[in-house]
Image: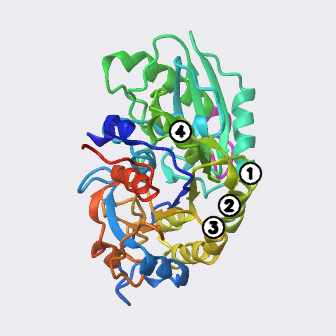
Amino acid sequence: MMADFELLKTLIQPAETKIVLLVMDGLGGLPRPEDDKTELEAAHTPNMDRLAREGCLGQHYPVDYGITSGSGPGHLALFGYDPLRYEIGRGVLEAVGIGFPVTEKDVCARGNFCTLDANGNITDRRAGRIPTEVCARLVERINQANIQLDGVEVFVQPVQDYRFVVVMRGEGLSGEIEETDPQRTGVPPLPARPRAPEAARTAALFNQWIQQATATIRDQHPANGLTLRGFAKEPGLPKFKDVYGLRAGAIAIYPMYRGVASLVGMDRVEHQAKTVREEFEVAKHVWSEYDFLFIHVKYTDSRGEDGNFEAKKAVIEEVDAALPVLLDLKPDVLIITGDHSTPSQLRSHSWHPVPLLLWAPATARRDGSDHFGERACARGGLGTFPARQIMPLALAHALRLQKFGA
């Protein structure tokens, strides 16, 4: 199987070409009733439309038909890793993303601060999307409580907005634990439950920590509760340079996406960018250092989860307006896609295929498309395929794969 990387390793050849993978998180959408257009189709995207005319389109499934993908599996698939074989919990992604030194003794969990009512039921799963500085103060308050658990160390660090990470370090710990976020309001957080007998002790330790940590922030507002998701241990993935022979760098604002890139061996490009254009300027600054750049745009997903069609469309237009900064660098291959679909009508990730644009001026076969959108991608020359085949396509168009066989 291509996901095992054995075939690719035999075909990799050196080249001076450069590849950019531009990921608009949650890009795919559903048409709204008033004009029958998705956010991508309704957006004013003259630059992407030109690239569609000069390149070719398709659509991909991050995991499989009908399966709604999380961000971790979706990005693994984009990087060529079969997400059904290589599983990464979100906790590890968050920890690695902020530079925490994860060890083999660690179980990591992503935390969300939430709002609880007087009965202990969740009224807001994200505590009104509190800013990062408030998150940091809450984490400091928890750390000052100096929660002690038998046989383990506990590390708590802020991530971004309402997100934080909890790392439990000790012997014999397991990440086979169900998340405590019920994914809905009007009910209390769930207890951490083991998915396997060997995780019973670890789940009990996390429940002790949750009880004591929640007690320390009970008088705060709006963040007076917490939930934990993505319990996991470090997975030991094959590394990008070994698999693809690429010097790869990751430019992302949100730590989790720097985390998944780090786990596959990409360099985390340090920067202070806050906008899409600034991210593209960072790419310009480090252009000579890398063969492959992964650039991540978060807010297409966030606005989709908010149910805000116009705001998601505006993020797509912001990306399009900034594209000339990237195009001036003259990448040999530019792929624009998402890690999953997040239709604003559903306010959540979905199972719908994800639009993809491949632009490679020297090697792409034009398919007659005239704009970048879901229906155009469904008719595109690349067809519909698993996301893990994107990397072989990128390598081939960058002339980095030899012929297979005599």
Residue 67 placed where, x, y %? Answer: 28, 53
Residue identified by numbered label 1: 271
Residue 164 placed where, x, y %? Answer: 62, 40
Magenta stretch contains residue 314: no
Q: Residue at x 43, y 30 (%)?
A: 192
Circle 2 residues within 10 Å: few <14, some 14–19, many ≥20: many
Residue identified by numbered label 2: 279
Give the number of the mark in front: 1 or 4. Answer: 1
Residue 290 placed where, x, y %? Answer: 63, 48
What label sits on residue 326 in the rendered view? 3
Identify which amino acid the numbered label 1 is placed on: His
Q: Nearer the viewer, residue 251 or 42?
A: 251
Q: Which numbered disc, 2 or 4, marks the residue that appears first in the sequence?
A: 4
Helix, strand or loop under label 2: helix
Q: Nearer the viewer, residue 264 or 313?
A: 264
The magenta stretch is 214-223
Q: Which numbered disc, 1 or 2, marks the residue that appears first in the sequence?
A: 1
Residue 285 placed where, x, y %? Answer: 74, 57
Q: CA distance from mark 1 to mark 2?
A: 8 Å
Identify which amino acid the numbered label 3 is placed on: Leu
Labels 3 & 4 near each other (Cβ < 8 A): no
Helix, strand or loop under label 1: loop
Q: Nearer the viewer, residue 56 or 340?
A: 56
What label sits on residue 93 in the rendered view? 4
